[in-house]
Image (cartoon, rainbow, N blue to C red):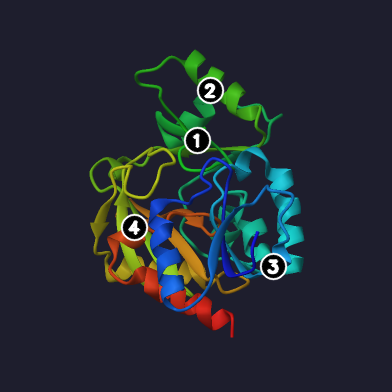
Amino acid sequence: MSKADVTLITCAEFPDLDPDDRLLANALEALGLSVNSTVWSDQSVDWSASKLCLIRSTWDYDKRQDEFLNWLDQVSTATQLCNDATLIRWNIDKSYLQNLAEKGIRIIPTRWLNADDEIFSSQLVEQFGLDLVLKPTVGLGGAGVVRINLREQKEVEFESSLRHLKKSGKIMVQPFIQSVLHEGEHSLVFFEGQFSHAICKSPFAQMAYAGLAGETTITPTTEEIQFGEKVLAQLPKLALYARVDVVSLNGQIHLMELELIEPSLYFSYSDNSEQVLAALIAMRLV
């Protein structure tokens, strides 16, 4: 690893970065900064050789969580890490949604289950209805997410999915949000708390390069932007980058997820957004 002003962190499967992040690398280089990309799990790397490390496509951390958390300690003591390790640790398990709910943020109604918790589908149907979504509390994209519609599927399928997911640890059960079928899930991108741009994602999209999962550009409402700002105001530290994913439920905006670790930022969907983030990164190097 040669010395660099900025190192963009990726994983072994995508050593050359998401093509969308190439736009950011180009913008950083246009500012006269030296840039390289490095796999987070490469144990030969001297992280102090970079002035700032920016987490991007670390799309395997959920399968190597303990290793990733240890890496956070290592890199954050060697150099400047963005986002901050405190934010990443807080955001790595979707239980952070409980914390935000306690602070007044509307989240999707959720039942949290530990691996040894016993629950019957009838209890969940009474709480959420017949159309349910099960997901692990640690996971990327749509990995591990299962939709069970008990109008059409047998209870044995629900029990099988529940047992399988519990093997990964804590899980969450939510009602399926019907609005995503015709309105989609809106993802709002913020840099240092300021709204940049937004896209609409398809429901249950799997992890893919930006632009390859049916995304479209949207203009969010003022209410959506203000909701995103309210979410980010609850964080213990300012996030260099953040993606606030929201859906409509009963006519109100609800938080689906807050992405602070490795979200696609969709630079190609917004002119000059990569230059904006590059300039903010450059200011952190002064």
Residue type highlighted by circle 2: Ser
Whole-percent x, y for residue 60 in the image:
58, 42
Whole-percent x, y for residue 262 in the image:
52, 54
- On the image, which quarter does residue 80 sit in? bottom right
Q: How many marks?
A: 4
Q: Tell me, yes or no, if residue 49 can be seen here.
A: yes
**Mark closest to the chain's N terminus, 2 or 4:** 2
Tell me, for residue 143, which label it has, or none: 1
Question: Does 256 sit left or right of 38 as displayed?
Answer: left
Q: Residues within 10 Å of mark 3 (few under 14, many from 20)?
A: some
**Mark closest to the chain's N terminus, 1 or 2:** 1
**Mark closest to the chain's N terminus, 1 or 3:** 3
Residue in the image at 58% along x and 49% along y: 94
Question: Could you give the CA–CA distance between mark 2 and mark 4, rounded to whole angstroms?
Answer: 30 Å
Front tag of 1 and 3: 3
Whole-percent x, y for residue 270 in the image:
29, 65
